[in-house]
Image (cartoon, rainbow, N blue to C red):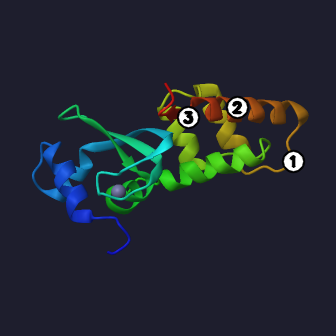
Amino acid sequence: MGDGYNFAQLKKAILAMSRATDWEVAKKEWKLVGISEASEPETCLCGHFPIVELCTISNNTTERTVDVGNVCVKRFLGFRSDLIFASLKRIRKDITKSVGSDATAFFYQSGIINDWEYGFQQNTMRKRNLSPAQLATRRKINEKIIASIGRRGIS
Ligand SMILES: [Zn+2]
């Protein structure tokens, strides 16, 4: 504690939007459905400020959707959104790099990359020496991923 991430407060807020009343069960009702970046820092459900890397989580049972900071999503809900954001940073810095396995699965599930690209990612993710055609495909996939990240607060 003492770093601004108030677990009790987050838990209470999440439980209020869940069907289950037991925390361990309630957690399982939630899924990571999106990531975005705030242009103006926001406050997490836990009270932590500022948060910029936002994770949208959704509860299939109650149909509630809420944004939580990257740290809370990882620490308390167990989603490795931090790895997705790390992948994003990597390809923004160098478009010829590949996103990792967590990001690949996430962007596939979100419908950003298609079936073929999902297969391509798995075959080439760990390869450093790609053919020019493969490199062009990797770039295209990376550009699609970068373009899909929503920016909040710009209207
Ligand atoms: Zn938080």
Q: Nearer the viewer, mark 3 or mark 1?
A: 3
Residue 146 is situated, as x and y percent measured from the top left of the image, at 64, 35
Residue at (87%, 47%) from the top-left corner?
129
Residue 92 is situated, as x and y percent measured from the top left of the image, at 71, 44
- Rendered-image quarter of ligand 1: bottom left
The residue identified by callout 2 is: 143
Q: Which amino acid, by three-letter code, is at mark 1? A: Asn
The residue identified by callout 1 is: 129
Q: CA distance from mark 3 to mark 2?
A: 10 Å
Residue 125 seen from this side: no
Taking the image as shown, residue 57 lies to the left or right of residue 110, namely: left
Q: Nearer the viewer, mark 3 or mark 2?
A: 3
Residue 139 is situated, as x and y percent measured from the top left of the image, at 77, 34
Residue 141: quarter of image: top right
The residue identified by callout 3 is: 149
Element on which disc 1 rests: loop
Taking the image as shown, residue 50 lies to the left or right of residue 88, namely: left
- Few, some or many C-alpha atoms within 10 Å of disc 2 (few <14, some 14-19, many ≥20)? some
Element on which disc 3 rests: loop
- Few, some or many C-alpha atoms within 10 Å of disc 1 (few <14, some 14-19, many ≥20)? few
Question: How many marks do you count on the picture?
Answer: 3
Q: CA distance from mark 3 to mark 1?
A: 27 Å
Residue at (77%, 30%) from the top-left corner?
137
Q: Are marks 3 and 2 in contact (CB under 8 Å)?
A: no
Q: Which amino acid, by three-letter code, is at mark 3? A: Ile
Q: CA distance from mark 2 to mark 1?
A: 19 Å
Nearest to N terminus: mark 3 or mark 1 = 1
Residue at (44%, 52%) from the top-left corner?
51
Residue at (36%, 59%) from the top-left corner?
48
Q: Residue furthest bottom?
A: 2
- Few, some or many C-alpha atoms within 10 Å of disc 3 (few <14, some 14-19, many ≥20)? some
Residue 115: quarter of image: top right
